[in-house]
């Protein structure tokens, strides 16, 4: 009996020791994957006796303990922060993923690095001197860059932007409105962005600026005397300025006034871009009188690329990326911004021929067309018809319209074609800013990889200007630089000068200053004109006496 009891006691002691060792081995095996890589884990696990493994596999309690240990360990090391977000590619709102965020996403500055592989976001262009593994940037749906999971809420949408591209507002659905608190209207009104079209990407901006800003810009445009920037018949093109019969507005460039700079900065902020004055053409102020308009066209430039600029934004070049049109007054009838490929508000789109027939059958509206002087069969009449049958944004003071000229990968958006509907009653004052995806034409060069880059970085070196000084009809004039005589400048002559941004020039007759210019536009080639018609009345008698 004693011997039998000793055997039973020994069996329980051995069983207890064996069970304890089993637990230790189980915990150790469970932790291996958390400590070592999988290959090393497999090697170590292989050394554990098969009898122990079989015992663990056959013991339900130990298996449950192992599962619990794994789950607990994962919760400790990768604790969920109770935020599920929706991740999309830049400018799109479909084919994204849902992602439960963990503590590692809280690490400031690594949000893009961690999210990029989730949807395969990477640089669009591979260039030898740029690290191809640079992560994508993360933006909110209103264009705010996000650095950490701390900056998102449960259910938020985020958009991954390749490091060589720029944020594009998601469209989501027509009629969707978003308040933009980081874009400030000086009057304190909320700026609201509404999606008007998904393809092309078009958005209405409400309360984007106040009445004082609108009035200031119009006043500044009217006050410009410089021939390069004063209000005059609009031209087309970048390299060569041409007067076009299909663009009948007047325009001026207001670039350096406090109001103009503030509006430009506000537009860059809305676009989710850092403000760089060399990435925009300057604020182009437009006046449309009755019957005046601009036939449908693209803002994306088709100029031929060369050693000074690569215009192909789909291949390392730069071009007009986005356009924002600001409306400075209410227009009684006409003056809309029309999109050739945009559906009408009811979702329909009819042909130009049907639109023209519909216009001619609308007797009340067509009476305004005829009284405005628009000729039957002209491009103006055809455009008025399209303005009634396409997506057309009506001008209201304080509002603006945003549209993109490029796709998220830099390709030209062939559906961004648009026009300015002729004014049928009243007058239209507006302005537009063309924002580029990099340095704009005029002070650029292309590097050895074909990229468009700044020729002279603003602030590092003076910006060089090839200046043409042309005297049309003022006799006996002399050209001065900062009060010092430069050259004789008689009627009918011109001088080619290497000047710089900020230089001041003047024309004198008999020692009296009759005209002054300041190079305040960063354009590589500029012209100053001296003509009788541009002189102040007080100077006319002096000039005429020389004749």
Image: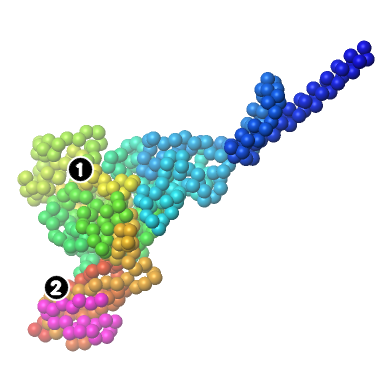
**Quadrant (top left, top right, bottom left, bottom right) of the N terminus:** top right
Residue drawn at point x = 21 percent, y = 54 percent: 302
Relative to 353, is 483 on the left or the right?
A: right
Which sits in the foreground, 354 or 423?
354
The quarter of the picture where residue 434 lies is bottom left
What range is drawn magenta here?
Answer: 478-498
Residue 433 visible, this angle: no
Marks 2 and 1, how far apart at CA? 40 Å
Position of residue 68 relative to residue 174, above or below, is above
Residue 267 visible, this angle: yes
| Prevalent SS, magenta region | strand
Q: Residues within 10 Å of mark 1 (few under 14, many from 20)?
A: many
Residue named by callout 1: 340
How many numbered marks, from 0 up? 2
Which sits in the foreground, 342 or 312?
312
Position of residue 111 relative to residue 18, above or below, is below
The furthest residue to the right:
2
Relative to 271, is 546 on the left or the right?
A: left
Q: Nearer the viewer, mark 2 or mark 1?
A: 1
Residue named by callout 2: 533
Residue 357 magenta: no
The kind of secondary structure element at disc 2 is helix
Scheme of colours in the image: rainbow
């Amino acid at each position: 009996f004693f011997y039998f009891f000793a055997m039973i006691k020994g069996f329980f002691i051995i069983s207890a020791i064996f069970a304890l060792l089993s637990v230790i081995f189980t915990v150790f095996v469970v932790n291996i994957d958390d400590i070592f890589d999988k290959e090393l884990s497999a090697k170590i696990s292989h050394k554990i006796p098969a009898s122990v493994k079989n015992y663990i596999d056959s013991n339900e309690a130990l298996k449950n303990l192992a599962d619990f240990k794994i789950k607990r360990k994962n919760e400790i090391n990768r604790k969920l922060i109770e935020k599920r977000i929706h991740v999309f590619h830049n400018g799109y709102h479909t084919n994204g993923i849902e992602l439960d965020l963990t503590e590692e996403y809280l690490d400031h500055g690594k949000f893009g690095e961690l999210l990029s592989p989730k949807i395969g976001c990477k640089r669009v262009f591979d260039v030898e001197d740029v690290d191809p593994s640079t992560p994508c940037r993360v933006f909110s749906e209103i264009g705010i860059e996000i650095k950490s999971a701390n900056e998102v809420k449960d259910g938020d949408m985020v958009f991954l932007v390749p490091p060589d591209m720029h944020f594009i507002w998601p469209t989501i659905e027509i009629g969707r409105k978003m308040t933009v608190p980081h874009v400030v209207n000086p009057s304190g009104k909320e700026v609201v962005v509404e999606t008007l079209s998904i393809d092309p990407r078009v958005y209405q901006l409400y309360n984007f600026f106040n009445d004082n800003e609108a009035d200031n810009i119009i006043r500044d445009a009217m006050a410009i005397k410089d021939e390069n920037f004063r209000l005059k018949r609009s031209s087309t093109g970048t390299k060569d300025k041409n007067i076009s019969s299909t663009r009948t507005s007047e325009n001026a460039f207001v670039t350096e006034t406090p109001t103009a700079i503030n509006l430009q900065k506000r537009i860059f902020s809305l676009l989710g871009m850092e403000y760089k004055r060399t990435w925009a053409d300057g604020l182009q102020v437009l006046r449309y009188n009755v019957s005046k308009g601009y036939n449908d066209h693209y803002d994306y430039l088709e100029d031929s690329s060369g050693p000074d600029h690569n215009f192909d934004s789909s291949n390392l070049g730069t071009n007009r990326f986005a356009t924002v049109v600001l409306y400075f007054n209410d227009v009684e009838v006409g003056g809309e911004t029309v999109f050739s490929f945009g559906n009408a508000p009811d979702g329909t789109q009819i042909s130009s021929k049907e639109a023209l027939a519909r216009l001619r059958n609308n007797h009340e509206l067509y009476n305004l067309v005829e009284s405005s002087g628009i000729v039957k069969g002209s491009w103006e009449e055809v455009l008025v018809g399209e303005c009634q049958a396409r997506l057309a944004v009506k001008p209201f003071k304080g509002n603006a319209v945003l549209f993109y000229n490029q796709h998220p990968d830099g390709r030209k958006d062939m559906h961004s074609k648009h026009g300015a509907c002729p004014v049928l009653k009243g007058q239209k004052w507006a302005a537009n800013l063309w924002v580029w995806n990099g340095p704009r034409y005029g002070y650029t060069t292309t590097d050895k990889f074909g990229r468009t880059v700044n020729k002279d970085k603003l602030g590092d070196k003076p910006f060089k200007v090839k200046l043409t000084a042309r005297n049309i009809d003022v006799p006996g004039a002399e050209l001065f630089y900062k009060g010092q005589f430069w050259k004789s400048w008689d009627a009918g002559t011109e001088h080619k000068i290497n000047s710089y941004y900020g230089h001041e020039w003047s024309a004198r007759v008999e020692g009296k200053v009759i005209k002054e210019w300041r190079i305040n536009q960063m354009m590589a080639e500029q012209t100053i004109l001296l003509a009788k018609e541009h002189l102040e009345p007080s100077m006319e008698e002096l000039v005429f006496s020389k004749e």
